[in-house]
Image (cartoon, helix red, strand yellow):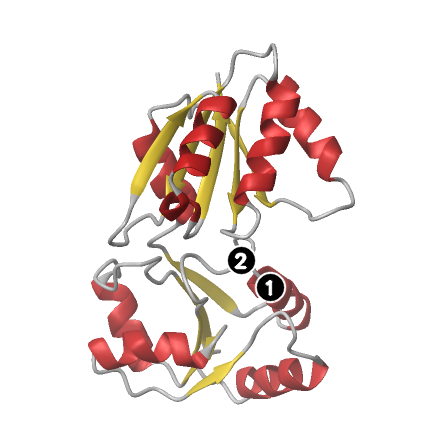
Amino acid sequence: MAIFYVISTPIGNLEDITLRAIAILKEVDLVLCEDTRVTRKIFEKYAISTHAISYHAQSGEAKVGIIFDEIEKDKNIALVTDAGTPGISDPGSLLISEIRKRFPDLKIVSIPGASALTAALSIAGVPTHEFIFLGFMPHKKGRETLFREISFSDRTMVFYESTHRILKTLDSLVEHLKDIPKKVTLVREITKIYEEVIQGSAEEVLEILINTKEKQKGEFVVIVSK
């Protein structure tokens, strides 16, 4: 039977991809991409000409049916996301779950590589023997409950945030962490040109972003720790 590969791709710098990942992307019969336009940049840099189709959060049953048909034809398939490791805060985990149900004997192989989660933790200088990853914070339902959990947890808490919501999130951290001595670390635009780490109390970090609007831009990994 064919092999289904789950391949990590760069989170910013296109050179952060493994030799094994490049080789397999060239060898498989089909690549499933979150956005084919994004993946095409990797293909162009490394001379990859494999056929690619989209698979993302809005892909319906018809697209899943196409993927199942290719598996039944013994085609080797690779799954990639726009950035980082598929299945970590993206719909790839749902597809893999369905594939495991439908094809229990299919070999599913991880090709590890870049992950914003582990990259950020590696340079934050915070306790990492135990941590909880929350993915993207919800916009409404359950949001306050998670912030309360963050404030009282003894473990390092990590989540992703967008440029549009980072100030609101820091406001919430200021509110929930008052009188609680915790460190907030923002890892912004990791592996990209403007990568930086901003660290301090919630109030200090918020003040830095308010005073420097350029620092409000980009993609953020937020770490709350002792």
Observer-nearest residue: 214 or 129?
214
Circle 2: is it few (<14), some (14-19), or many (20+) Cα within 10 Å?
some
Tell me where residue 209 appears, x and y as whole percent: 43, 37
Mark 1 = which residue? Answer: 91
- In the foreground, 99 or 179: 179
* Alpha carbon distance from label 2 to label 1: 6 Å
Q: Position of residue 172 (x, y in %)?
A: 63, 31
Given residues 211 and 12, the one toward you in this image is 211
Check disc 1 and report its element: helix, strand or loop: loop
Q: How many marks?
A: 2
Three-letter code, disc 1 = Pro
Residue 61 sits in quarter: bottom right
Closest to the observer: 63 or 13? 13
Residue 96: quarter of image: bottom right
**Residue that mark 2 sits on:** 87
Name the residue at the front extreme. 211
